[in-house]
């Protein structure tokens, strides 16, 4: 009987993937892949003879294609092999289910059709961010949003926590047909964020290294400078807190504790 296992390859080639995920890749009848570079593709090919890149479903040169269609075609390709009763692995870079809809959609459909399907966690870009920047997100909490969703919906950033904006290079690009946004839309994002942050507030453009020989991009800029820095499909924006945590005095009273009790 067919089954589907979605695994994350991590961000950095070969070293950030779990042993269990590697075993599934070796064992699979078919491996579908979506990884950031040719090195990782070749590494997957060294583990399994039938590795098929899902990149082919993205719009090709001069083609205009909505990414919703791309994702559905990816899911269809995966489900066809599950229906052919194969053990199918879907190997996606980072964590397979973090800011990534294909594995969630494929798992849901496979289960609806009566197949076993599961996801194994992977090392996401955000996990690398905390490591490379030396930040414990638990110290004051953190929020994570897809940049365009952050603009289009009524999200309220908590300025005493870290705020991570994913897909910053696509901020405001709602058509799902482009792979970058415009300066004007980044300016609108900066103005939107200026409701809560001073334009001089320091933020970070982060790009984790895909290969061990590379160094991560950690570029500290002011919020206002966001309009002028190059952003790529792998850029993530981190907005550190702009104010200290403030105590919830009503809660302290309910718990019958004082600030001094907190140590
Ligand atoms: N599933 C992936 C993960 O777990 O990291 C995330 C996929 S999401 C569609 C793509 C976004 O992830 C990018 O726009 C960027 O915000 C972030 N990202 C991907 N690769 C990255 C890298 N090398 N460094 C920093 N952020 C990255």
Image (cartoon, rainbow, N blue to C red):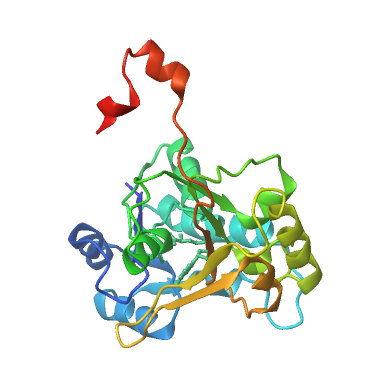
Q: What's the residue at 64%, 69% (across, down)?
A: 169
Q: Is residue 108 above or below residue 167?
A: above
Viewer-proximal residue among 224 and 7: 224
Return the x and y of residue 135 as percentages of the image width and height: 35, 58
Return the x and y of residue 49 as percentages of the image width and height: 30, 77
Instruction: Name the side, left or right, on which 259 lies relative to 149.
Output: left
User: Could you tell me how many numbered marks the image carries?
Assistant: 0
Residue 48 visible in the snapshot: yes
Q: In the displayed image of the protein, which residue is found farthest to the front?
A: 260
Q: Is residue 121 above or below residue 70?
A: above
Return the x and y of residue 64 as percentages of the image width and height: 77, 71
Q: Is residue 119 above or below residue 78?
A: above
Instruction: Name the side, left or right, on which 142 lies relative to 173.
Output: left
Q: In the displayed image of the protein, which residue is found farthest to the right?
A: 184
Viewer-proximal residue among 93 and 81: 93
Q: What's the residue at 55%, 65% (across, down)?
A: 202
Q: What's the residue at 73%, 70% (across, down)?
A: 181
Q: Quadrant of residue 51?
A: bottom left
Instruction: Name the side, left or right, on which 198 lies relative to 145.
Output: right
Residue 172 visible in the snapshot: no
Quadrant where the C terminus lies? top left
Viewer-proximal residue among 111 and 237: 237
Return the x and y of residue 142 as percentages of the image width and height: 45, 47
Instruction: Name the side, left or right, on which 66 lies relative to 231.
Output: right
Q: Quadrant of residue 35?
A: bottom left
């Amino acid at each position: 009987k067919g089954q589907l296992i979605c695994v994350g390859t991590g961000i950095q080639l070969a070293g950030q993937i779990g042993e269990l995920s590697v075993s599934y890749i070796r064992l699979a009848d078919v491996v579908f892949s979506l990884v950031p570079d040719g090195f990782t593709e070749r590494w997957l090919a060294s583990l399994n003879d039938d590795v098929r890149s899902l990149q082919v479903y993205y719009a090709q040169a001069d083609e205009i294609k909505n990414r919703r269609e791309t994702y559905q075609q990816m899911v269809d390709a995966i489900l066809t092999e599950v229906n052919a009763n194969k053990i199918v692995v879907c190997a996606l870079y980072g964590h397979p289910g973090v800011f990534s809809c294909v594995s969630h959609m494929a798992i849901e459909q496979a289960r609806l059709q009566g197949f076993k399907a599961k996801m194994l966690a992977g090392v996401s870009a955000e996990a690398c961010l905390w490591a490379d920047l030396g930040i414990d997100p638990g110290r004051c909490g953190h929020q994570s949003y897809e940049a365009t969703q952050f603009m289009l919906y009524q999200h309220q950033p908590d300025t005493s926590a870290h705020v991570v904006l994913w897909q910053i290079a696509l901020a405001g690009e709602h058509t799902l047909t482009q792979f970058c946004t415009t300066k004007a839309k980044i300016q609108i994002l900066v103005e939107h964020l200026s409701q809560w942050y001073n334009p001089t507030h320091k933020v970070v453009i982060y790009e984790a290294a895909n290969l061990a020989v590379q160094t991560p991009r950690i570029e500290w800029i002011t919020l206002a400078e966001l309009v002028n820095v190059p952003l790529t499909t792998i850029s993530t924006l981190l907005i550190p807190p702009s104010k200290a945590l403030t105590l919830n005095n009503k809660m302290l009273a309910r718990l019958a504790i004082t600030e001094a009790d907190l140590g």
